[in-house]
Image (cartoon, grey):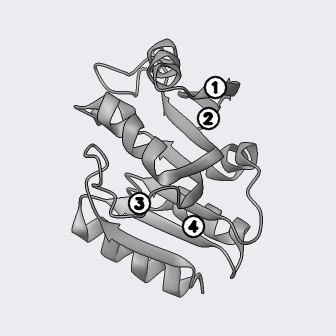
Amino acid sequence: MFSDPVANTSKLGLADGMKVIDLGAGSGFYTFEAAKRVGSTGRVYAVEVQKDLLERIRSMGKTQSLNNIEVIWGNVEKIGGTKVKDSLVDRAIASNILFQIEKPDDFVLEIKRIMKPGGKVLVVDWSEVSPLGPKTPFSAAKAQALFEKSGFKLDQSFGAGDHHYGMVFTRP
């Protein structure tokens, strides 16, 4: 099975009223699942650099009556690039993005900036053994080292589908 947003977001402990950010939201599969889990009192920020994908997320969110999604045209690799306030979010989602990032240290520092202390980040990316993944995957070991270098603590690692690894980190 490919990466499953329902199963993977269940690892984050999402609850009503939480604020969640989906970094590099892409098609919005994680955005929509998070929006369902945080309810009408919660908020999900879908940050994406491609405007056409943001329009798709906005449109599909309305179709699904998910009025708690805010789309943001932003750069997740730049400090301040997500355009959200410091210590705003309870949870962050980084799915299938690490292998594309040119500045991974800045990406993690931006997550740290926007996340409340004690917040959690879900990392899902391509397994090194997947024949379907990118030519140069971002390994689980490299991802763990990257987040731990910035003070995040690994809570759990899990198989996130046949072609992906998953991890949850807590912000100090």
Quarter of the picture holding the C terminus: top right
Q: Mark 1, residues whose alpha carbon is within 10 Å: few (<14), some, or many (≥20)?
A: some
C-alpha gap between disc 1 and disc 2: 7 Å
Please name the residue that numbered disc 4 is placed on.
32
> What residue appears at the point 72 percent right and 66 percent down from the top-left corner?
37
Q: CA distance from mark 3 to mark 1?
A: 29 Å
- As displayed, is residue 140 above or below residue 59? above
Q: CA distance from mark 1 to mark 4?
A: 27 Å
Q: Which mark is residue 27?
A: 3
74 in relation to 134, above or below: below
Disc 2, SS: loop
Crowding near the residue tagged with mark 2, few <14, some 14–19, many ≥20 C-alpha atoms within 10 Å: some
Residue at the image point whose x is 57% and y is 67% from the top: 32
Q: Tell me which amino acid carries mark 4.
A: Phe
* Residue 70, picture quadrant: bottom left
Q: Are marks 1 and 2 in contact (CB under 8 Å)?
A: yes
